[in-house]
Image: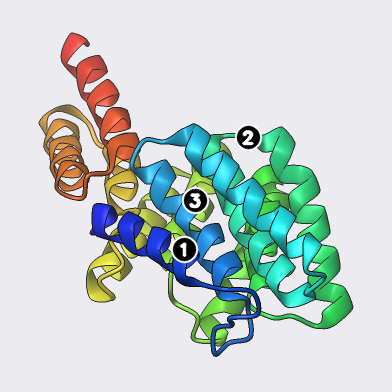
Amino acid sequence: GLLPLADEHFRLACDLARGSDSMPIGTRTEIHARSWWAHARWLLGDEAGAAATSALAVENGRQIEHPYSLTVALAYAAVTHQLLGDTRGLAPVLAELSEACERYGFAYYREWATVLTGWAEGGEAGLRTAQLGVEALEREGSLARMPYWLWLVADLHRRTGDTTAALATLDAAASRATAHDDRWWLPEVLRARSALDSGSSAVARLEQAADLAARQSSASLLSRCRADLDALRRG
């Protein structure tokens, strides 16, 4: 949730990385940093910058012909498209990401594609797909971003009319965010949870979400909370 610091360090990583500079996990440093940087830029309210940063990371991944770096860039780009609400742009990215993971046997990012594919598909079939992706991440012990993945599953529950499951999943997402200090998406989890509350409880939870978003400098999530608070107060 230290977004301005993250923004600055992603910029430094991209500026300082040179050519074949690689991370221990095998990705080219600049491509991985630029891919991830897009999420910080979106949270800070820079949608155009997030889209451009993500697109450049994918383009660079293609240029160097390094399959793993391109796969990572595509995975982060898929999340970026979801954050931007760009479902049309999300579909081809997910198709390419899934194909690359299948071709080269890449795990982890394969599960990202599974969860996001299920979310984009919607309905009971999409819900089952997304749940399979989350279960695979949990089996692998890959708990980073779990509040975000669970939020996607909760959204599917809500869209299929299962409010009880949506509530339970959002509560689990909030608990994971606190337990693992993975708070970047917690304001949105709380905002979604407030939509299933009523009266003063909804307002209190929204105010909590807005306060957290403000403290994290998360302009995008703060604007969503404020819009919901205005609507509630008018209602």
Q: Amino acid at mark 1?
A: Asp
132 w.r.t. 8: above or below:
below
Instruction: Give coordinates of residue 87: x percent, y percent.
Output: 67, 36
Is 103 in front, or is 26?
A: 26
State the CA–CA distance, disc 3 to disc 2. Answer: 14 Å
Q: Residue furthest top?
A: 234
Q: Which mark is residue 15?
A: 1
> Which quadrant holds residue 32?
bottom right
For label 3, the SS is helix
Q: Is residue 128 visible?
A: no
Q: Is residue 4 above or below residue 160?
A: below
* In the displayed structure image, the side of residue 43 where residue 28 appears, left or right: right
Which residue does the image show at 25% across and 59% down from the upper left?
5
Disc 1 to disc 3: CB gap under 8 Å: no
CB atoms at circles 3 and 2 under 8 Å apart?
no
In this figure, which residue is indicated by the disc labeled 3? 38
Name the kind of residue labelled 2 in the image: Asp
- Element type at mark 2: loop
Q: Which three-letter amino acid code belongs to the residue tagged 3?
A: Ala
User: Where in the figure is residue 75, as x and y percent of width and height?
Assistant: 65, 61
CA neighbours of label 1 inside 10 A, class few (<14), some (14 to 19), many (20+): few
Can you see residue 24?
A: yes
